[in-house]
Image (tube, rainbow, N blue to C red):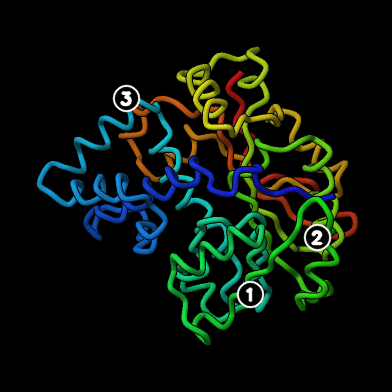
Amino acid sequence: MFYFMPPDDSSKTAEYMALFRALETRRSSRTRLFADPLSTRFLRPPLRRIVSVASLPGGRELIEKILDHRIPGARSSAIARTRLIDDLLAEGMEDEAWPLVILGAGFDCRAYRLQVLKRRDVFELDQAQILEKKRARLNAQPGTHSNVRQIPIDFNRESLCGVLERAGLNASLKTAFLWEGVTNYLTAEAVDSVLTYVSRFPAGSRLVFTYVHSGMLDGTVKFHGAERLLADVAKLGEPWTFGIHPRDMDGYLERCGLRLVVDLGASEYRQRYFGDAAGEMRGYEFYHVAMAEVPRPAENRTRIAPAGSHA
C-alpha cells in the first residue's frame, strides 16, 4: 500500500507552509525567492489577516520576527527549500516532455505558477476531499489548467501503480516525481514502497523528496528547537514518525533501486539562497531536501552534492 499524507485532511502544518509562502510573496520582486500568489487562498481568516498586516510598513518584518522566535528556522527553511525544489524540478526539464507526478499534492501550486510546468502533464495525487477543497479554493473553471490532472486516491485501498495507469501516465516515459513534506509522517515500509515504485521507471527519471534526520526523532542528535517542534506537531495530531540519518541515505536509496544525486540540509540550502544572512538563521537543520534518479546500467554512483550530516 502507498501512503502520502497524514490522516488529517485539513493539515495545519500545510496551512502554515502556505502562510510562509504568502509572506515571501509580499516581498519586493527584487528580493523574494519566488512568488506564490495563490497561497493566501488556503488560509483561514485569522491567517489571512496576518498576511494583510504584512502589507503594512514594517508589518512583514514584525510578523517574521515573531514566527522565527516561535518556530525557530521553520519559515526560513520552508522558503529556501521551496525555491530549491523549484530549481531542481526545472533543471534539465526545459527541453524534455516528461510528466510530473506530485504525491500528496495538498496545497502545492507549482503546476500553476512555474513556467516549466505550464505545457507538460502534471498529475496531482491526494485524497478526494483534499483535491475537492483545493479546486474550490483555486476556483478552477472547466478547461483551465487542462494539463493538470487531479487524481483522487484511497491510499488504504488503491495501489499507486494502478491509479496512475488508469489516469493515463505512460510508465515508459522518463518521469519526474515530487514528494514534499510527507515522508516524516509515514512508516519505513510506506517510504520503501514508494521509492521502489519510482525505481521501475526509465533511467533518468527522478524523485525530489524531503526527509528529516533520524537523530532528531530519537534524540541522539540535538537540534535547536527540535524538542518543542516535535511536541507541537504531536499536539496538532500530526506526529512525525520517520527519519533517516543522512550518512545512510546513499545506501538506502541504492537498496531501493535509486541513485542519490543531491542531499542538502537546511543550513546548506539556506546558505545557497540567503548567502551570508543564513549564518544568523537557526533551527530546522534536521530538514533535508534530496533528489534521486533511476540509474542507468553500470552507472557510476557519484553524487553532485554531499549529504549534509549534522551529527
Q: Secondary structure at mark 1?
A: strand
Could you tell me the amino acid type at mark 2?
Answer: Leu
Q: Position of residue 3 (x, y in %)?
A: 75, 48
- Reading the image, the residue beneath label 1 is 149
Would you say 56 lies left or right of 140 here? left
- The structure residue drawn at horizontal position 45% and vertical position 42%, both measured from the top left corner, is 78
Question: Foreground residue, 65 or 260?
Answer: 65
Would you say 120 lies left or right of 295 here? left
In this rendering, which labeled residue sits more in front, label 3 or label 1? 1
- Reading the image, the residue beneath label 3 is 69
Q: Position of residue 95 (x, y in %)?
A: 60, 78
Mark with earlier residue (3, 1): 3
Q: Secondary structure at mark 3?
A: helix
State the quadrant of the C terminus: top right
Question: Foreground residue, 78 or 306?
Answer: 78
Q: Is residue 262 visible?
A: no
- The structure residue drawn at horizontal position 37% and vertical position 50%, both measured from the top left corner, is 44
Kindly check if marks 3 and 1 are in contact, taking CB atoms under 8 A apart as contact: no
Identify the mark at residue 269; answer none if there is no mark. none
